[in-house]
């Protein structure tokens, strides 16, 4: 703790937090949504193949894949890439805005943004994504720039747009790569054209409670055990925690997981005072309950293999 400085508030952490038991939809449960997405993305004649992580229906025009570990659906069309379009897309309605760090960015205007949101809702319905616990959708636009050989800017613009939706359970955000819905799109035909959609969400089946012991115990259970932070401190690094939030951890689509468990998601900067230009960043998720607390629930003793096969 002596080596760590907090530039953000440490979340309030109660004596106990929820753990959510969950299961993965199988390929058969996803089949109708897969067919719908393939048709909406205009993938044409499909054939079924086994993949490293599950099963897919694919064609020369794109793929829709289901991950066995999580029931996640990943889809994309390659047609627009093969057309060799410029990265600068011709959006009819662009506006200037500021991101959360205050940087100037381009975003879609009101009409184009509304079309994007409507398309995202349509793809979620066609793919039969479970949106019961989804958060409010957020529109993100790829920022594109071109510079000359001296690094001087020549032009800037916007690329592909993505509508992003996260999830919440038991009053907590579900963090990690295993809880998200994304719909990608480009402009065309007077509106927006989908280029792919991703849905990673294990179905919640029940809720338990794990004993935490308060804020200090939560930090000691994970963040203060982070080996990279330990190495940084041993080397004389000054560690600054810049962002932090409490949530339920959902593992990536290719990982089997039986419970979503409480964790702290944080971003840290490590500086070396004697080398002013030398710094790096660490982004991590740390559990907030110790092995003994999980053992009491019969969920095993290894934090990041909880409920996994």
Image (cartoon, helix red, strand yellow):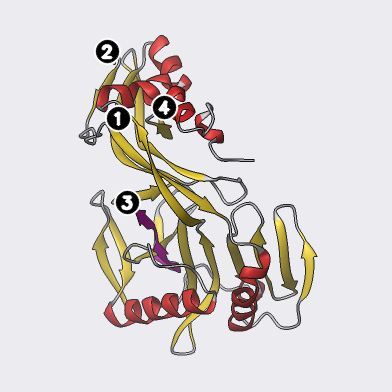
Q: CA distance from mark 1 to mark 2?
A: 13 Å
Tell me the number on the disc at residue 293. 4
Percent across and percent down for residue 297 are 46, 33
Outermost residue toward the bottom?
190
Magenta span includes 106:
no
- Predominant SS of the magenta segment: strand
Residue 48: image quadrant is: bottom right
Judging by the rendered image, the residue that carries numbered circle 3 is 170
Residue 208: image quadrant is: top left
x 52%, y 77%: residue: 194
Mark 2 vs 3, N-terminal side: 2
| In front: label 1 or label 3 | 3
Residue 168: image quadrant is: bottom left
Question: Which quadrant, please, contains the C terminus?
Answer: top right
Mark 4 vs 3, N-terminal side: 3
Q: Secondary structure at mark 1?
A: strand
Residue range in magenta is: 155-170
Report if the CB atoms under discs 2 and 3 are less than 8 Å apart. no
Q: From the viewer's side, name the closer residue of 169 and 114.
A: 169
x 26%, y 48%: residue: 101
x 50%, y 69%: residue: 129
């Amino acid at each position: 703790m002596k080596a760590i400085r907090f530039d953000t508030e440490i979340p309030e952490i109660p004596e106990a937090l929820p753990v959510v038991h969950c299961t993965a939809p199988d390929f058969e449960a996803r089949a109708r949504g897969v067919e719908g997405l393939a048709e909406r993305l205009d993938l044409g004649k499909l054939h079924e193949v086994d993949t490293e992580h599950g099963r897919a229906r694919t064609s020369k025009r794109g793929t829709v894949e289901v991950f066995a570990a999580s029931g996640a659906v990943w889809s994309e069309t390659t047609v627009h890439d093969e057309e060799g379009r410029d990265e600068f897309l011709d959006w009819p309605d662009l506006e200037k805005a500021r991101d959360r760090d205050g940087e100037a960015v381009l975003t879609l205007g009101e009409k184009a943004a509304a079309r994007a949101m409507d398309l995202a809702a349509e793809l979620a319905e066609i793919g039969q994504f479970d949106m019961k616990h989804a958060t409010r959708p957020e529109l993100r636009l790829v920022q594109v720039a071109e510079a000359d050989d001296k690094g001087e800017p020549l032009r800037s613009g916007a690329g592909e747009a993505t509508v992003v939706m996260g999830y919440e359970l038991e009053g907590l955000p579900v963090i990690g790569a295993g809880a998200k819905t994304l719909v990608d799109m480009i402009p065309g035909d007077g509106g927006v054209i989908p280029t792919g959609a991703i849905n990673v969400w294990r179905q919640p089946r029940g809720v338990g409670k794990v004993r935490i012991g308060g804020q200090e115990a939560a930090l000691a259970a994970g963040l203060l055990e982070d080996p990279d932070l330990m190495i940084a401190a041993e080397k004389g690094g000054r560690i600054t925690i810049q962002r932090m939030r409490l949530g339920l951890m959902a593992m990536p689509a290719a990982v089997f997981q039986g419970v979503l468990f409480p964790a702290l998601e944080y971003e840290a900067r490590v500086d070396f005072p004697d080398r002013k230009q030398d710094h790096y960043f660490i982004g991590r998720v740390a559990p907030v309950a110790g092995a003994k607390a999980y053992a009491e629930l019969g969920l095993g003793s290894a934090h990041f293999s909880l409920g996994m096969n």
